[in-house]
Amino acid sequence: MYKIKNLIKQFVKPLLFLIGLTMFGLGMIGVVVPGLPTTPFMILAAACFVKTSDRFYKLVINNKIFGKTVLDYRSGKGMPFRVKIIAWVMMWCFGLYAVFSGIPESLLYIRILVFILLIIGTIFIYRVPTKVMNEE
């Protein structure tokens, strides 16, 4: 049993690290590309790095742009209401653009999938606690 757990650990840790690097890369692209979110990717990267690389975890949480937001989310403080509204507006603007203009009509199943993901994302953001602004 110990060998199986050790084998799983040897496989999972590098996989989590690679997923963390991918999320970090997507988040960094999101800093400069409008419509591609940064913070959700960085939250996922931090979740992967907390188990695999202290150095990369600190790189994410000490960042001037998104570090505090990642820490607030990970500690359970949630998101400020203003950030939730911005996330919803951006998500729905770009999502609806993709559904009605960006995705070809022949790919109806992709359009439906994107719309379903918009609904799931909306519900997810709604369920994240709203951070009280005077709370530090």
Image (spheres, grey):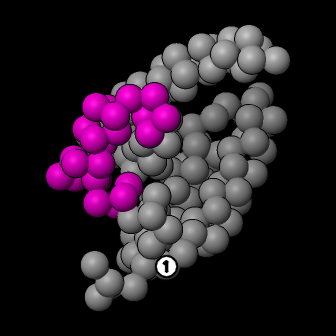
Q: Quadrant of the N terminus?
A: top right
Q: Please give the range of residues in magenta.
A: 49-71
The one of 83 and 66 positioned closer to us in this rendering? 66
Residue at disc 1, secondary structure: strand
Q: Residue furthest left?
A: 64
Instruction: Report if residue 85 lies within the magenta region.
Output: no
Residue under the image location 63 percent in, 14 percent down: 11
Q: Residue at x 50, y 68 (%)?
A: 76
Residue denoted by label 1: 130
Q: Which of the 4 image quarters holds residue 132? A: bottom left
Residue furthest to the front: 2
Give the image location of residue 113, x and y in percent.
75, 42
Is 94 displayed left or right of 30 in the figure?
A: right
Is residue 50 part of the magenta span, yes or no?
Answer: yes
Give the quadrant of the C terminus. Answer: bottom left
Residue located at (45% from left, 48% from top): 43
Secondary structure predominantly adopted by residues drawn in magenta: helix
Q: Quadrant of residue 34?
A: top left
In the image, 128: left or right of 4?
left
Is residue 29 visible in the rendered image? The answer is: no
Closest to the observer, 63 or 122: 63
17 and 97: which one is in front? 17
Coordinates of residue 90 in the picture (x, y in percent): 45, 59
Residue 95: x percent and y percent? 57, 50
Other-residue count near label 1 (Cα within 10 Å), few / some / many at <14 / 14–19 / ≥20: some
Residue 27 can be seen in this image: yes
Q: Residue 33: give x, y in percent of width and height.
A: 32, 39
Q: Amino acid at mark 1?
A: Thr
Query: Is residue 126 placed above or below 20 in the rendered structure?
Result: below
* Residue 25 drawn above or below residue 10: below
Identified at 58% across, 43% down, the residue is 98
